Amino acid sequence: MKGALIGCGFFAQNQMHGWAGIPGVDIVAVCDRDPTRRNDTAARFGARPYADAADMLAAESPDFVDIATTVASHRPLVELAAAAGVHVICQKPFAETMPDARAMVAAVDAAGRTLMVHENFRWQSAVRAAIEAVRGGAVGRPFFGRVSFRSGYDVFSGQPYLATDPRFIIQDLGIHILDVARALFGDVATLAASTRRINPAIRGEDVATMLLEHDSGVTSVVDCSYATRRLPETFPETLLEIDGDKGTLRLDAGYRLVIQAGGEQIRDVAPPVLPWAERPWHNIQESVRIIQAHFVDCLRRGTQPETSGHDNLRTLALVEAAYRSAADRTRIDMRAPEWT
């Protein structure tokens, strides 16, 4: 299976390492407008470099394309790939607006190809262990959950553009945490959000708290912060608390999964440090390989990915609704036509 990468920046290096670990997959070409980035990445991974995505797709005829660029370029690149008849895996946030996202999904549907969003937090092995436990009935029927990511880690050094965007933590990180809440508890009926900017050196919000009512009857709190100073630093761990009618589940700091339901089970669900990975990023780096393997498996089986374009429309709607709620100080009905 031949793939091609568009975007050779900071995070794309993880994606290239991830693809290299999946049997039967070869990334034959990479594309970036920056000659240093594309040539260095091509040399490191044995791919052919291109400056133009259309030229690359025409010359290489890949089976799929991995789009690892910033959000403003996603729609034209997804539509370009669809027109070329290529399967697509696209980085999050999927689109700048809901109309753009719907158009991208429609374009790939019309081409008869598969579209998956690289929404990797629900694929982290520790989070996945919790999701599978909940889906398997470990705590019975959930009625409350908290999905939390709080850190003071400097994410701006590797991705300086994050400090200049008027939207920050919900769009960049909260989208992941909201998606984990959906994976655990299902789709959302209502949402209310509040935001703060603590760091004066950035443009967007760095603290967000969201209250969700799910169609399943679960109430969840999703909270995110890049302004939390504590030791030990837990970046990049997502912490969970889930109450069910038969017990409780916690994913604690240090990748410790605790299930209390007629007894207590404690599991170490720490992710491995892959040969190319490094702490503390190893958690996310492992999830990259896992989600990409899921994408390839779906292509081979002809099935839809768990984080398909259609599915991610519902996660992206939560992001847009959270900004609306925070600005207007209102509760948003996610069943209204504009969000579905």
Image (cartoon, rainbow, N blue to C red):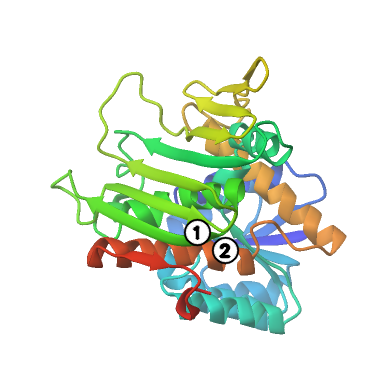
Q: Earlier in the sequence, mark 1 or mark 2?
A: 1
In the displayed orientation, state which residue is furthest to the front. Answer: 245
Looking at the rendered structure, the kind of residue marked 1 is: Lys
Question: What percent of the width, then of the height, locates residue 270?
Answer: 59, 23
149 relative position to 114: left or right: left
Question: What percent of the width, then of the height, locates residue 194?
Answer: 27, 53
Per the image, the residue denoted by label 2 is 312
Task: Choose between 295 and 51: the one closer to the eye.
Answer: 295
Q: Please report the residue visible at 46 percent of the width from the left and 46 percent of the height from the top.
A: 220
> Which quarter of the rendered picture does the N terminus lie within?
bottom right
47 relative position to 69: left or right: right
Q: Please report the residue visible at 38 percent of the width from the left and 66 percent of the height from the top.
A: 332
Q: Please report the residue visible at 73 percent of the width from the left and 68 percent of the height from the top.
A: 62
Does 139 sit above or below residue 217? Answer: above
Circles 1 and 2 in contact, beta carbons < 8 Å: yes
Q: Please report the residue visible at 66 percent of the width from the left and 37 percent of the height from the top.
A: 134
**Number of numbered tags placed on the structure image:** 2
Per the image, the residue denoted by label 1 is 92
Q: Crowding at label 2, few (<14), some or many (≥20) Cα neighbours within 10 Å?
A: many
Question: What percent of the width, then of the height, locates residue 106?
Answer: 63, 81
Looking at the rendered structure, the kind of residue marked 2 is: Asn
Task: Choose between 42 and 327: the one closer to the eye.
Answer: 327
